Image (spheres, helix red, strand yellow):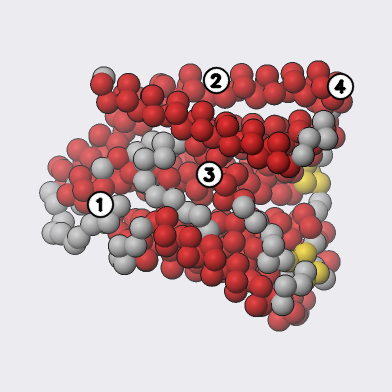
């Protein structure tokens, strides 16, 4: 995804890349319809398994709300990860950044300022902390030419360590009543964090499918050098993608505070694996050049439902991990087959 500066190309070349991205998006939309249909069928089959093993209450309102609440935080993280992977990158630090954001937003200083002004200060702090971490990732990868896997792995370790230093490895309790009242409130039977996930998903779909930013993201993931020659500022665009992913990790930190009423350095541990799994199962190519927000949302719901089935049947976390690992391997193998078939055609 790295590139070197060049003179601004003729508008015709830029337009051709835009058209190529649109053409690619059109083909993907057609094939994506069938892929999403397959994901919906998989989700329905999981619900059938849940009904058989746990009874009809599995599809009752209370359990559906439980599944959606579980899916909301992973879902917001997954939307940001979809953009990064579509551009051919990866971000292993989202779970640790979530934990750091939750800790920073619940420090005594932040909560005191929020108490004297407005609880939105806590939200702003968490999002800015996440965006700052994303900025560091983006600069290291785009301008420092550090491999994304290594740069974000370093951020994973550093962010978790900084969160432990700030919190002293203790949970920091939420003491702002206004924050708690808003984020734990219900609207139409759904908690605020579920609505936030829905809004982020819709905005993410619009950004990826209906804006120049989204088309450039697909172009960078498809062929970074061609995108650069067409006038796209690949390094700047890559940096913005990681800032976006980090900011959404910060927002997920806010949602975690709302769900647990604490900020903790342990929040978000290993979430990056669930996030990447949901994005890959949803149909976004790990090699970049193709991404789907709808598929990501379905992937998140499939994993949330699967976890719920395991929980309802008292299966251990170890069994869940084995099953998730098998699903990820199958999804990647399927992606490789589809990619090979696409190259032949």
Reading the image, the residue beneath label 2 is 38
Image position, residue 132 (x, y; %):
50, 69
Q: Is residue 223 above or below residue 177?
A: above
Reading the image, the residue beneath label 4 is 55
Earlier along the polypeptide chain: callout 3 or callout 2?
2
Asked if labels 2 and 3 touch by Cβ distance under 8 angstroms, the answer is no
Q: Nearer the viewer, residue 291 or 42?
A: 42
Q: Nearer the viewer, mark 1 or mark 4?
A: 4
As measured in the structure, the alpha-carbon distance from the residue carrying label 1 to the one carrying label 3 is 26 Å
SS at badge 3: helix
80 horizontally vs 232: left or right: right
SS at badge 1: loop
Q: Nearer the viewer, mark 3 or mark 2?
A: 3
As measured in the structure, the alpha-carbon distance from the residue carrying label 1 to the one carrying label 4 is 54 Å
Earlier along the polypeptide chain: callout 1 or callout 4?
4
Reading the image, the residue beneath label 3 is 276
Give the crowd class for mark 4: few <14, some 14-19, many >=20 residues within 10 Å.
few
Reading the image, the residue beneath label 1 is 232
Earlier along the polypeptide chain: callout 3 or callout 4?
4
Give the crowd class for mark 2: few <14, some 14-19, many >=20 residues within 10 Å.
few
SS at badge 2: helix
Q: Is residue 303 above or below residue 154?
A: above
């Amino acid at each position: 995804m790295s590139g070197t500066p060049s003179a601004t190309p003729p508008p015709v070349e830029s337009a051709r890349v835009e058209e190529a991205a649109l053409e690619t998006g059109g083909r993907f939309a057609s094939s994506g319809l069938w892929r999403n249909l397959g994901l919906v069928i998989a989700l329905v089959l999981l619900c059938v398994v849940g009904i058989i093993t746990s009874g009809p209450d599995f599809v009752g309102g209370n359990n559906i709300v439980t599944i959606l609440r579980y899916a909301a935080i992973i879902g917001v993280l997954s939307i940001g990860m979809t953009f990064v992977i579509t551009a051919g990158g990866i971000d292993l630090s989202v779970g640790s950044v979530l934990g750091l954001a939750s800790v920073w937003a619940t420090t005594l200083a932040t909560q005191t300022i929020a108490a004297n002004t407005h609880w939105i200060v806590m939200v702003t702090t968490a999002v800015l902390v996440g965006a700052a971490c994303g900025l560091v990732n983006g600069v290291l990868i785009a301008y420092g030419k550090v491999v994304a896997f290594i740069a974000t792995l370093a951020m994973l370790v550093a962010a978790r360590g900084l969160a432990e230093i700030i919190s002293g490895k203790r949970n920091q309790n939420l003491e702002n009543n206004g924050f708690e009242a808003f984020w734990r409130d219900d609207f139409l039977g759904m908690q605020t964090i579920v609505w936030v996930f829905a809004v982020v998903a819709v905005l993410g779909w619009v950004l990826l499918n209906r804006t120049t930013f989204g088309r450039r993201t697909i172009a960078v993931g498809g062929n970074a050098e061609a995108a650069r020659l067409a006038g796209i500022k690949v390094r700047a665009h890559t940096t913005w993608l990681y800032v976006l992913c980090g900011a959404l990790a910060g927002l997920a930190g806010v949602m975690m505070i709302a769900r647990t009423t604490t900020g903790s350095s342990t929040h978000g541990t290993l979430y990056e694996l669930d996030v990447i799994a949901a994005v890959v199962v949803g149909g976004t190519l790990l090699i970049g050049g193709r991404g789907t927000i709808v598929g990501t949302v379905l992937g998140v719901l499939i994993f949330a439902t699967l976890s719920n089935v395991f929980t309802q049947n008292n299966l251990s976390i170890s069994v869940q991990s084995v099953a998730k690992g098998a699903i990820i391997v199958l999804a990647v193998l399927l992606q490789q087959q589809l990619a090979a078939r696409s190259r032949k055609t």
